[in-house]
Image (cartoon, rainbow, N blue to C red):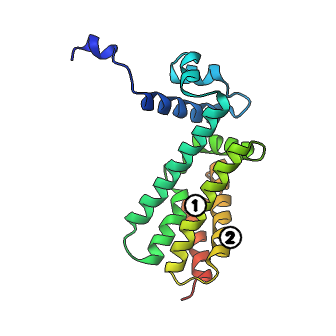
Amino acid sequence: MTAARQAFTRESAGARRADLIEATAAVLAEHGLVGTNVRAICAKAGVSPGLLRHYFSGIGDLVAATYQATSDRMDAIFADAVESAGSDPRARLTAYLTASFRPPVTDPELLGAWTAFWALARSDTRMSAIHATSYAGYRARLCELLRACGARDAERLAIMLTAMVDGLWLELSLDAASFGAEAAVEMVERAVAALLPR
């Protein structure tokens, strides 16, 4: 195919949707909810506003799709961390919990998008449903990993450890020099050691 023909090749619908979702995450990260609008997203994606409306019913639909895509991406990162840890149950649990303190989860841009999602989850039922499903899935997988390590009351431990990881991730994202990723990993490892049977 010649360069001229390649220039006129259209992207697939899935690729265009993915580009708009990626642009939305970037705009949320850079400008927050106040600065996230159709014009800013389309400028970031390099497309016309009409194209956005072709693939999404509006900005709310696009932001919800961005939250879902971001949640799915995080799930895949955590699953990969567990698989890379081998077969030892304790190593798999630690890998799952501490993946939040390593790239790409520590990408500063993720904080801006994620805090916008959290803010919207308080007032938008669709965003609230995505949040509930995402966190329920994270805790359910954490419960499985805890049970594999012999934990009793895995559901309550999963809630506590999720809150701990979220808090440490948030502090690191706001100020990476505050205590550092390795200190966060050590804190989580110490908590796990104290909570699980020896």
- Residue type (three-letter) at the residue carrying disc 2: Met
Q: Earlier in the sequence, mark 1 or mark 2?
A: 1
Say above or below: 162 vs 173: below
Tell whether 23 sits left or right of 118. left
Quick one: label 2, few (<14), some, or many (20+) residues within 10 Å?
few
Q: Residue furthest right?
A: 123
Which of the 4 quarters of the picture holds residue 63?
top right
**62, 189: nearer the viewer:** 62
Tell whether 81 sits left or right of 153. left
Name the spot of residue 43 as percent of width and height, x first. Answer: 57, 19
Residue at label 2?
160
- Label 1 SS: helix
Quadrant of the image containing the N terminus: top left
Q: Residue furthest bottom?
A: 198
Say above or below: 33 vs 7: below
**Residue 108 in view, yes or no:** no
Residue at the spot 55% in from the left edge and 24% down from the top edge? 44
Name the spot of residue 148 as percent of width and height, x first. Answer: 49, 79
Quick one: label 1, few (<14), some, or many (20+) residues within 10 Å?
few
- Label 2 SS: helix
Numbered label tally: 2
- The alpha-carbon separation of the residues under discs 1 and 2 comes to 15 Å
| The disc label shown at residue 172, or none | none
**Residue 198 in view, yes or no:** yes
Say above or below: 173 vs 18: below
Residue at label 1?
137
Name the spot of residue 15 as percent of width and height, x first. Answer: 43, 30
Q: Residue furthest left?
A: 1
Residue at the spot 62% in from the left edge and 55% down from the top edge? 133
Which of the 4 quarters of the picture holds residue 33?
top right
- Residue type (three-letter) at the residue carrying disc 1: Gly
